[in-house]
Image (cartoon, rainbow, N blue to C red):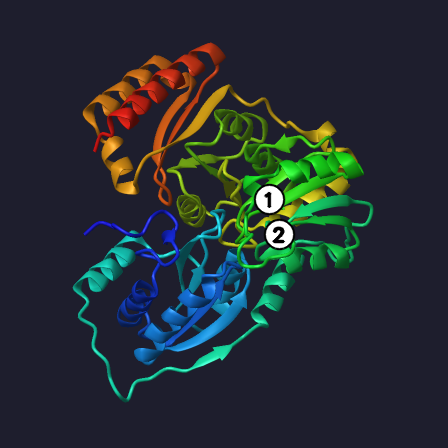
Amino acid sequence: MGNKLFGTDGVRGVANVYPMTADFAMKLALACAETVCKNKKRVAIGKDTRISGDMLEAALSAGFTAKGIDVIRLGVLPTPAVTTVTPMLDVDMSVMITASHNPYKDNGIKLIAADGEKFADTVTAELEAKIEANNFSYDENALGKIKDDHKAIDEYVKNAKSTMKTGANLKGLKIVLDCANGVFSQIMPEVYNELGAEIITLACSPNGLNINKDCGSMHPQNMMEKVKEVKADLGIAVDGDGDRIIVCNDKGEKVASEQIIAFLAQNMQLNGRAVVSTVLSNTGLERFVKEELKLPYYSTPVGERHVVAKMKEINGAVGGEESGHVVAYDYCKSGDALIVSLLICQYLLKANKKMSEIFPIFAMDPFEFVSLRFNSREQVKEVVKLPEILSLVEEKKKLLGDEGRVVIHPSGTEPLVRVWVSGKEADKVKAIHSSLVNAFNKLQQQNVA
């Protein structure tokens, strides 16, 4: 059975609209209790700053405790914190309630295995089957308890600070931090203050309704303007759950995620370990890693989970996506804005240069990228499989040959089709991209599927 509800990053939707309802959340917890929670009979739950987080946390807790599973409520903390502390909590699994970079009306449920990794598709398919069957049983003698553990964040911060060499600090750096009114609103300023950096904060006042609203990694313009205004050394913008990072240099110019991945690979002592990114990453990154750094490079399907899985398989050191997920695997098994930002700042101080003098590290190949919105994720799944689309894509791939890449990616979390083309000749890339976008636009107008 395939996954109908679980996308590349869990289940997501509008809060109080199926599947982001209290009823669904409780049934998901019941299914997890029967399928996953057979050993420790304990789970941990974290959440971001959305107003709907409380409702979903309560429903999940009800489902777990109704099946005799104890619940540890971790409170508001970053997604990478949950993946980091889960192996320390003696639990069967953890749940993170978040819709990441989406607006506050959305929410989502990410399932995290006992080792801190995301669940395999086979497990989530089994969970969906149980929810659909809706044949749950109860035992009057099996009831779980709920307790709070707000110290888990301390372990995460300790791990993040372990990226710093003994006695090292960030004195001399002036940094603009945009925390997206999300999970890092308190944590990140505290860490940077403790390490001696001069900080200017933006969007650090969450109220349940303003997460990601005109701020953070999805809207870094305010951060970029503030860097220029206060003459900061760099700007750092994160998303609502803390697994994405967007950086700008001292001139307020955005630095591509591929450049950040290259910068980390260049400065970390990788000893031949690989760099991993997705098919949507700029093709210039692969060439730089292989030819300049002399390191192995692997490309995966779109989605952070695929990057992490490949890194685990081949003992990769650095990886990520163009969307802002950057993974330093020795420190965290997911994208982690705090850890990555600390590494960037240390290497920037070591270089003793302005960011604008360091970046770009390599020449980006010409590329065109757009996200096209459809009515539903189901419609997106149908559209990308249409014969005329498949035929056109193959035709354009042949036209580019080995000089570039064509990727048509249905989003796993939103009703979007991402159309991405990269190559060495800008005019050819633009023409191919335009023809593909026009084909999808015609389908939108015809309301196909």
Are the residues flagged by discs 1 and 2 in contact, CB closer than 8 Å? no
The residue located at (28%, 52%) in the rendering is 5
Horizontally, residue 19 falls left or right of residue 271, namely left
Q: Quadrant of residue 421?
A: top left
Within-10-Å neighbours for mark 1: few <14, some 14–19, many 20+: many
State whether residue 84 is above or below residue 280.
below
- Three-letter amino acid code at disc 1? Cys
Residue 115 seen:
no
Determine crowd level at label 2: few under 14, some 14-19, many 20+ residues with C-alpha closer than 10 A. Answer: many
Mark 1 vs mark 2, CA separation in Å: 17 Å
Residue 92 spot, x, y in % from top left: 38, 70
Q: Is residue 237 visible?
A: yes
Look at 48% across and 21% down and name the residue there: 367
Image height of 436 relative to 328, above or below: above
Task: Tell me residue 313's x, y (percent).
Answer: 40, 48
Q: What kind of residue is marked 2?
A: Leu
In this rendered view, identify the residue nearer to me: 32 or 162: 32
Give the residue furthest to the right. Answer: 172
Instruction: State the residue at coordinates (17%, 64%).
Output: 133
Secondary structure, mark 1, is loop
- Quadrant of the image occupied by residue 71: bottom left
Compared across the picture, whether 356 is left or right of 448 comes to right
What residue does disc 2 label? 338
Tell which of 311 and 90 is nearer to you: 90
Q: Which residue is situated farthest in the top direction here?
A: 427
Q: Earlier in the sequence, mark 1 or mark 2?
A: 1
Q: Position of residue 55 (x, y in %)?
A: 42, 67
Query: On the image, numbered disc 1 is attached to which residue?
Result: 215
